[in-house]
Amino acid sequence: MSIKTWSPERVGLALAVLAAFGFSFKAIFVKLAYAVPQAVQVDSVTLLALRMLFSVPVFAWVGWRASRKLAPLARRDWLAVVALGLLGYYGASILDFVGLQYITASLERLILFTYPTLTILIGVLFLGKTASRREMAALLLSYAGIGLAFAHDLHIAGDTRAVLIGAGFVFGSAVSYAFYQAGSEPAIRRLGAARFTALAMLVSTVATLLHFAATQPAVALVQPAPVYLHALGMAVFSTVLPVFMTSAAIRRIGAPKTALIGTLGPILTIFFGAWLLGEPLTAWQMGGAGLVLSGVLLISKRPVAAVAQPPRAAAPLGAGESH
């Protein structure tokens, strides 16, 4: 079957899987950058600033292309973009980067991916959404797998205090990102995936650079070449590409389903962490991976006798955005 003949739902599912693959590499890039031998170790704020600086040209260009033929944003749309930009790729990222200074990449992913549960709960509690039985069953399978691997990692951790500090920061990141993802769905439907994503990322970049300017000397941006390479890889493969894939997936299949498919991320990070960082890979983690994959397959499988539903209202496309 040609990709051109895929249904919007199938395309959305594929984009969500590819986004999970890209995001799963973010923690690997961060840990590799932290491990670069140097006199003064790169800190979380500097590394995040480098990530955003490498990303901002793409988002600025996409934002200009997506907005030039459309009406200016209304005041409520600007408020949504600013709030969600601060929550998503500034607030969530800075908390995550700090947490990665204390815990392994595998453990970080496992804690961070409590956000699909939080996204669904936010949608139900504040946005008037409902969770289907299929979504709940997929969620239970996925989080049983994450919990299995997480319990094992916590058990074998040597410094419990460091794990708890890092876990606290990463869980705060999950809460921040869950609010971003839950709130982004209505914003994407009003503004279009490309326009919203580019503007939200520009807000995040401005906030990150202001944070850097207030807390770090400019000389902190002078780093060894490997740090720049890891930051560039993170910007391209774990920021720009998966950010747009995630927004496009949310537009086609909704935030809850996109979040559930994103639970592939911790499993991919476990494998990459073992391969590239020498982190442990155990039977407990493999069992958890199996449960997570089962949940993803369940949410991705179309019901055999599904009743036809009315088409989802399409979001306005910005210039340069395609299906």
Image (cartoon, helix red, strand yellow):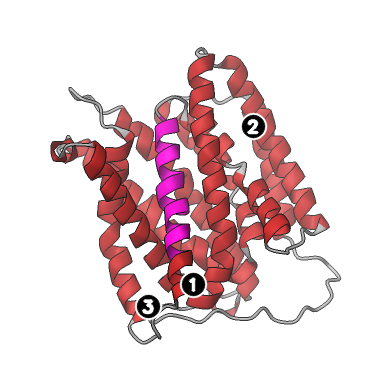
Q: Distance between the residues labelled 2 and 1?
A: 46 Å
Disc 3 is placed on an element classified as helix
Count how many numbered circles sit on residues in the image.
3
Residue 293 circle label: none
Residue 232 shows in the view: no
Which residue occupies the extreme front position in the image? 75
| Residue at horizontal 18 percent and vertical 40 percent from the top | 221
Type of secondary structure dominating the magenta stretch: helix
| Residue at horizontal 25 percent and vertical 26 percent from the top | 41
Label 1 crowding class (10 Å Cα cut-off): few <14, some 14-19, many 20+? few
Residue 209 shows in the view: yes
Q: Mark 1 points at which residue?
A: 76
- Could you tell me residue 239's position as x and y percent? 39, 53
Quarter of the image that includes the N terminus: bottom right
| Earlier residue among tags 3 and 2 | 3
Label 3 crowding class (10 Å Cα cut-off): few <14, some 14-19, many 20+? many
Residue 286 circle label: 2
Q: Distance between the residues labelled 3 and 2?
A: 43 Å
Q: Name the residue under label 3.
A: 66
